[in-house]
Image (spheres, coloured by chain):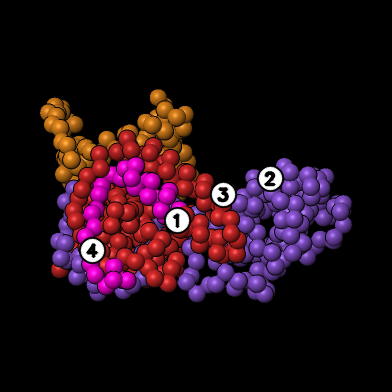
Amino acid sequence: MKTLIGTVDLYNRQTTNYEPADLFQEIDEKNLDDFEEGWRPAINQRLAGLSSRDEVTAASLQDWHWDWSAKAEKRAGHLAYESFAVECAGMTQGLMFVKTTAFARLDAQRGLELVFAEYLATAPWNRHGFTATPTYKGVGRVLLVAAISFSVDLGFKGRIGLHSLPQSESWYATTCGMTDLGVDLAVPPQGLRYFEMTEAQAQTFISP
Amino acid sequence: MKLLVSREWLRNKIATDPDVETQAGTALAVLEGIGVIVPPDRPASADIGDEKVIRLRVALGTLLRQLRHRDGLSVVELAARTAIREDEVRSIERDPHHIPRPRTLHQLATHFKLPVRYLMQMSGATRTVDKVLYNEAIRFAARSDDMSVLSDDEERALNAFVKLLAERADA
Amino acid sequence: MDRRQMTLMLSDKEMTVLDRLAETRGMSKTALLRQALRLYQSVTERLENGEKVFLEHPGTKEKAELMVL
């Protein structure tokens, strides 16, 4: 069942004000609808812009979205999967899907349980890469804190793992202080850099 | 579940955080592969005139044209079977300045049983291109003559290239 | 979040294993049992779908089938 974990503040870059946002565990229909009706058209529009076309169909993208909507529904009854959403101004601003049956690869914690983020994203209109006037800042930090908190809640002491997209590597390596295990070539199409956070790094990250 | 930090802590950190991208996840690699995640300084027409992309599109056009010939299909027939416009089939096969639409590539990938992400890379829609793919694609295109019937050599080269695409997709 | 309670009776042997696993992996006994449940659900579902679950030795690449339903 969708549960409110806490209320946080996101920074609206356009108005330069902070706005209250809710962090939820276990996403629901509203979040999936926001993903389909809100995020997807924005992404499609960007794709159309690339191809200089008016028609906004991207079959691969549609497959992916369907796949993830279907997956999200299928995962509802599965203990191994959990989802989180950040909502602000009545719209889903951030989404995260995690897996709890994953194990650490970093030597220092090899084989120990961790929370593995399969998907961590802020809405397209919040990203610099999408628009010259991105809206909310802070979704990434909120979701990361959620992942760490969830890890602690499960008894995994804050250990998390994720594959960073290239443009996010400096965030995870430097700001978040995670360990870089190198490019994981097993991720199609050409690999993604895999990061883990240790118990100690998690402690440091959430300290005042 | 309890959030391990206070609302105030988050607010202060967000204020001082660098304003950078934070996207993560293997699931997003798919989007990256089909060119949805792009750097902010890449305008829509950046690839026109970009030599590498032009060469890739020539290879893409050659590949699709040869597959069509191999299967004994006319442009009209292929267009009908894949629900793509005829002029678009011709443009992809012949015009390296034409930017194919993602849906079109998806239809062609399904029809010819090719990995769609490689077609996307060959169409210039993605920011990054597999190096091996690039080299093999250029080499493949260079071997082709522009006849409507494939010679034995061309057929062999075509099969080898298609096999490579399938193998890399499975790797 | 809703919580429900269960009383668990374990043999000495089982309790010893539970204690040791929890200590080795740095988790409470409850946390460990909950993780075991998650893993069990994942594995059995795959088996029910007709998939096979293998363990592979990294060095020899020798495979041992984990279980059959």
Residue closest to the eye, A22 or A111: A22
The hue in which chain A appears in the rendered picture of the protein: red
Residue B28, numbered label = 1
Question: Residue A186 appears at what percent x and percent y?
Answer: 48, 54
User: Based on the displayed image, in which of its 4 quarters is residue B90 positioned?
Assistant: bottom right
Is residue B135 at all visible to an observer of this figure? no
Give the alpha-carbon distance from disc 3 to disc 4, as whole Å.
36 Å
Q: Specify the amino acid type for callout 4.
A: Glu
Residue A19, numbered label = 4
The reply to whether callout 4 and callout 2 are in contact (CB within 8 Å) is no
Residue B89 in magenta stretch: no
Give the alpha-carbon distance from disc 1 to disc 4, as whole Å.
27 Å
Q: Label 4: few (<14), some or many (≥20) within 10 Å?
A: some
Marked residue chain, label 2 = B
Marked residue chain, label 1 = B
Residue B83, numbered label = 2
- Are marks 3 and 4 in one subunit? yes
